[in-house]
């Protein structure tokens, strides 16, 4: 039987989602907890995607297989009692045995949060940037992202992917209280893509580059021509959409 697990996490204390040697990851922590709760040593959890070190998720999905029926409410309660305070499970859902958390995802949405004023309570959960940014100019440039599919210029170099193509369906900034929030949705994302897009749009907001320059950067397919990568602590995976999960 295959089950989807829905969770959220504060990524501050983790070296990303994926299990890796000599580093604590969300996937490893969740796997260990689920193995103990279900009394199954060889359990494997497959995530909907990877988040890098320090990146957060307000919604993440993963799947695992288990031979017996599960009382979702009971297992969710036990997991949340066992897991550390920065990982929370919200649901466990029985799905078709061919369902796949990564390959079946139709759309993923990220948000990046920039603090416009210093806030000691949000320092680990957003990026404080004290220079004035032109949000209108950044929004105007962000519209160009929807016109393109090849985003090699925003990808981490030497990454092992077959294609740099992503279909972006929305990309925009809004202001909420003393935060600028960038929202972007696509069918897939490249490594470091959102953080480098935000860094390049910040250059737009500062007046360092123009909308025309932004277009040329995308067309160049050259990471060296794009802007800097903003800190991971402001980035959140906020939504993953599937045809069969509401």
Image (spheres, rainbow, N blue to C red):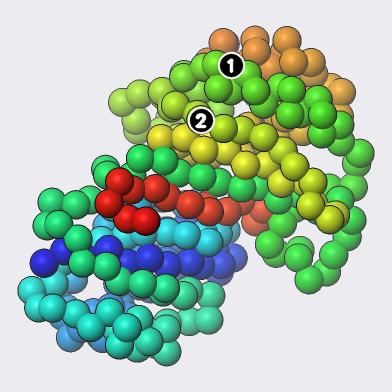
**x 19%, y 52%: residue:** 99
71 versus 180 height, above or below: below
Query: Which residue ends up furthest to the front in the rendered image?
Result: 246
Q: How crowded is mark 1: few (under 14 residues within 10 Å), some or many (20 or more)?
A: many
Query: Which residue ends up furthest to the left in the rendered image?
Result: 67
Residue 126's tag is: none
As drawn, is 201 to the left or to the right of 188? Answer: right
Tell me residue 239's x, y (percent).
48, 52
- Does residue 19 show up? no
**x 72%, y 57%: residue:** 126
Tell me residue 137's x, y (percent).
81, 25
Mark 1 or mark 2: name the one nearer the start of the chain: 2
117 versus 204 height, above or below: below
Q: Mark 2 points at which residue?
A: 169
Q: Nearer the viewer, mark 1 or mark 2?
A: 2
**x 23%, y 83%: residue:** 71
As drawn, is 187 to the left or to the right of 103? Answer: right
Q: For the residue labelled by badge 2, is the local secondary structure a helix, a strand or a loop?
A: strand
Tell me residue 116's x, y (percent).
86, 51
Q: Name the residue under label 1.
A: 218
231 versus 34 height, above or below: above
**x 57%, y 11%: residue:** 220
């Amino acid at each position: 039987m295959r089950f989807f697990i829905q969770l959220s996490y504060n990524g501050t204390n983790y070296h990303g989602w994926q299990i890796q040697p000599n580093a604590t990851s969300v996937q490893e922590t969740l796997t260990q907890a689920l193995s103990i709760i279900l009394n199954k040593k060889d359990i494997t959890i497959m995530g909907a995607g990877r988040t890098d070190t320090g990146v957060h998720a307000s919604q993440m999905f993963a799947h695992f297989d288990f031979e017996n029926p599960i009382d979702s409410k009971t297992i969710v309660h036990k997991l949340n009692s066992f897991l550390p305070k920065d990982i929370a499970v919200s649901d466990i859902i029985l799905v078709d045995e061919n369902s796949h958390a990564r390959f079946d995802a139709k759309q993923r949405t990220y948000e990046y949060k920039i603090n416009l004023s210093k806030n000691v309570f949000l320092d680990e959960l957003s990026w404080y940037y004290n220079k004035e940014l032109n949000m209108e100019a950044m929004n105007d440039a962000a519209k160009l992202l929807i016109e393109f599919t090849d985003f090699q210029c925003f990808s981490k170099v030497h990454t092992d992917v077959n294609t740099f193509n992503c279909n972006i369906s929305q990309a925009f900034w809004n202001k909420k209280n003393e935060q600028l929030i960038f929202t972007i949705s696509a069918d897939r994302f490249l490594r470091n893509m959102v953080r480098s897009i935000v860094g390049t749009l910040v250059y737009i907001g500062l007046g360092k580059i123009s909308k025309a320059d932004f277009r040329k950067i995308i067309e160049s397919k050259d990471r060296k021509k794009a802007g800097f990568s903003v800190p991971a602590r402001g980035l959140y995976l906020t939504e993953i959409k599937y045809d069969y999960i509401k």
